[in-house]
């Protein structure tokens, strides 16, 4: 059901054929619509990339993606961050903020104090040691991403960035419409 | 650090600005490299899409993504599938094949029998009722994806599909190089 031809640019036919059989994409069958095929490929690509980053974080820094994600969020907040706000920002599956905080506090990378305005909530801050360790990891992490995306030229990076930006907004707008809870069978 | 201009096409500046503050992308800071920004946007976009699909599966069919993923894998194997092969194909986090099999068997959608060649392994098959129920869900699922990706035209779909195919192969090839286990600090 090829309604349009796929132009040959960077990737070879062999490369595309190889990608077809990997992970999520094995679900795709002949006749699937182009949007569905693209979605399964996006999902597969993201999973593959994430798993390679998890592997490198473990091998190079003996750390996990949830822990790296936690530090990268907190790093941006130089005045500290409430624990519950950090929880809502972490999107990595299985991240347990309390458990990660215990570990990072024990390692001297993070401190926790009670909020002056709300005694029930914790404020988290990064220590200078924490900031330094995170910067080392973040630099290397960025190099990994550059290397893993090196097959895409600057124009393609900018174009995909823009297209995915439009897609995110479109998905957000679609969430308000269609499939209302009242239509539950 | 804009090394190239981003051409204005489908998405408006407002839309891009709105996407910048969503989820994973909040991690991105001024000065980040284009590849890193794209990667965070891909991750955010996939998470957003997946969470919308999870929501619709729950509302419309009272089912979960791991369960849908399980059925879509098994549906393709008309001669059945070994339970351990199915496990290795499911990439949804937290999918527990044994628990899902118990549920689906109870609902009459799947049967389990012992392998004639290896008595220790289970062979899974979909029942006609299971195939019928899955087809109904799969049709609607495909419509959701078409709707959620409707902002991308046919040419863009084909182009991104090709680019992500090249990316998957590049990531696969990179896994063999760099960051060997022996360099663990």
Image: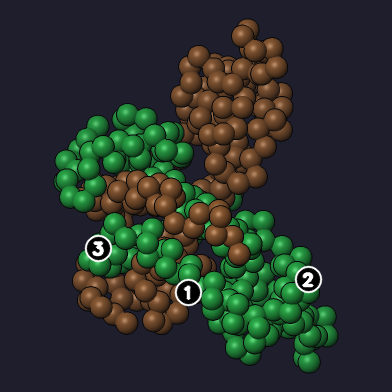
Chain colours: A green, B brown
Between label 1 and label 2, give the one nearer the viewer.
1
Q: In the visual, does A72 lie left or right of B176? A: right
- Chain bearing mark 2: A
For the residue labelled by badge 1, is the local secondary structure a helix, a strand or a loop?
Answer: helix
Q: In the visual, does B62 lie left or right of A16? A: right
Q: Is residue B64 above or below residue A151?
A: above
**Mark 2 touches mark 3? (CB < 8 Å):** no
- Residue A58: x, y in percent? 60, 58
Distance from the alpha carbon under mark 2 to that under mark 3: 42 Å
Q: Nearer the viewer, residue A102 or B22?
A: A102
In the image, are marks 1 and 2 on the same chain?
A: yes
Q: Residue at x 56, y 62 (%)?
A: A60
Q: Nearer the viewer, residue A146 or B158?
A: A146
Instruction: Kindly identify which residue carries mark 2.
Output: A102
- Chain bearing mark 3: A
Q: Residue furthest top?
A: B116
For the residue labelled by badge 3, is the local secondary structure a helix, a strand or a loop?
Answer: loop
Q: Which mark is residue A139?
A: 1
- Chain bearing mark 1: A
Q: Residues within 10 Å of mark 2 (few under 14, many from 20)?
A: some
Q: Residue at x 42, y 38 (%)?
A: A22
Q: Is residue A16 above or below residue B29?
A: above
**Mark 1 touches mark 2? (CB < 8 Å):** no
Q: In the visual, does A160 lie left or right of A110? A: left
Q: Residues within 10 Å of mark 3 (few under 14, many from 20)?
A: few
In the image, are marks 1 and 3 on the same chain?
A: yes
Q: What quarter of the picture does the N terminus of chain B occupy?
A: bottom left
Distance from the alpha carbon under mark 1 to that under mark 3: 21 Å
Q: Residue at x 67, y 27 (%)?
A: B101
Instruction: Kindly identify which residue carries mark 3.
Output: A153
Q: Which mark is residue B32?
A: none
- Residue B174: x, y in percent? 39, 52
């Amino acid at each position: 059901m090829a309604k349009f031809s796929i132009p040959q640019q960077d990737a070879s036919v062999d490369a595309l054929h190889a990608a077809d059989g990997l992970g999520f994409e094995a679900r795709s069958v002949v006749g699937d619509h182009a949007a569905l095929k693209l979605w399964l490929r996006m999902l597969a690509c993201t999973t593959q990339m994430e798993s390679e980053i998890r592997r490198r974080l473990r091998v190079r820094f003996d750390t996990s993606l949830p822990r790296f994600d936690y530090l990268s969020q907190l790093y941006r907040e130089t005045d500290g961050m409430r624990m519950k706000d950090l929880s809502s920002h972490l999107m990595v599956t299985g991240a347990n903020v309390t458990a990660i905080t215990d570990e990072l506090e024990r390692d001297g990378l993070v401190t926790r104090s009670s909020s002056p305005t709300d005694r029930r909530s914790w404020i988290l801050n990064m220590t200078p040691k924490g900031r330094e360790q995170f910067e080392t990891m973040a630099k290397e992490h960025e190099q990994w991403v550059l290397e893993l995306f090196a097959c895409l030229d600057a124009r393609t990076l900018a174009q995909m960035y823009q297209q995915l930006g439009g897609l995110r907004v479109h998905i957000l707008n679609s969430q308000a419409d269609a499939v209302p809870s009242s239509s539950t069978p």
